[in-house]
Amino acid sequence: MTAAAAAGPAAAGLEGRTVVVTGATSGIGRAAALAMAGLGARLVLVGRDRARLAETAHRAARPGGPQPEAYTADFTELRRVRELGEELRARHGRIDVLAANAGAMYASHTVTADGFEATMQVNHLAGFLLAGLLRDRLAGGRLILTSSDAHRQGRIAADDLSGDRHRYGAGRAYATSKQANILTAREAARRWPDVLAVSYHPGQVRTRIGRGTVSSAYFRYNPFLRSAAKGADTLVWLASAPAGDLVPGGYYANRRLRPVGGPAGDDALAAKLWDASAAATA
């Protein structure tokens, strides 16, 4: 690992690069989109709320620059993720960065129409499916997954993606999905050597995540949490830093490579999770 990879160089430009950001309507995704617009990216914004998505696209537009594209998609419906993938494939022959940032936390055990626990579907399976659909478009590009240090409390099992063996807890389900993000980046780096795949921890950020859970007030009003812009900083850096300064499959925080242990660092588990996710999303 180079010294630059450890310390983290300054962000470079994204001029002319096509960047897809999911979960772009608020929080980290919105802040990252606005920052990357300032670096010249051709933005493709994905979100569930049509009005907030339009507002983000309007804010990200630059006079004389590329106008952001906006796609409405609810990741609790894998059918819509597949439609989104086909729409993006039809419009873009190349995607330089896919920032798989969409995330959610549910107060109670919720099962989607696809039959999966909603946290795992939104935070992991939907992004996994979208990346697979865009695989050839990402050749030579980057896949960046928003994870969290909360992954340490996760307990993922490749043969139990919905966590049915354990009593549901919103925090534990979220942590398990974040563990899946790190494992996916590790395995993508192995299986897709022409795609620079990484994951990162944004820090504890004031966001809308956890609405309806006991964590909602903590994430929305705690004055000691990071701003969304600060939380998005590492994502923007990972999208724009020279590829040679980054470690494929690495997990980053504050622009620095961070070691992972336990299940999140288990390469055999990463391979099993990948196969199980591929089977689940067909």
Image (tube, rainbow, N blue to C red):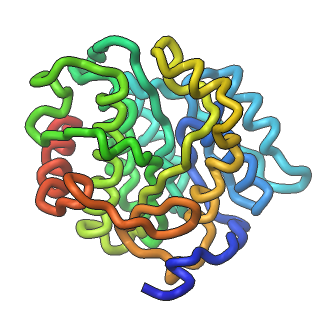
**190 relative to 73 in the view: left or right:** left
- Toward the right, the furthest residue is 63
Question: In the rendering, at what x and y percent does residue 203 appear?
Answer: 55, 47
- Toward the bottom, the furthest residue is 2
Q: Is residue 254 visible?
A: yes
Question: In the rendering, at what x and y percent does residue 242 appear?
Answer: 58, 78
Q: Is residue 197 visible?
A: no
**What's the residue at 53%, 27% (across, down)?**
209
58 or 66, which is in the foreground?
58
**What's the residue at 54%, 54% (across, down)?**
92
**163 relative to 224 in the view: left or right:** left
- Image quadrant containing the C terminus: top left
**Residue 42 is drawn in which quadrant?**
bottom right
- Image quadrant containing the N terminus: bottom left
Residue 119 position (above or below residue 141): above
**What's the residue at 39%, 42% (across, down)?**
150
Residue 92 position (above or below residue 277): below
Residue 1 position (above or below residue 21): below
**What's the residue at 33%, 53% (across, down)?**
182
Question: In the rendering, at what x and y percent does residue 37 appear?
Answer: 75, 53
Count of labels in the image: 0
**Residue 9 is drawn in which quadrant?**
bottom right
Question: In the rendering, at what x and y percent does residue 157 appear?
Answer: 13, 40
- Toward the front, the furthest residue is 224
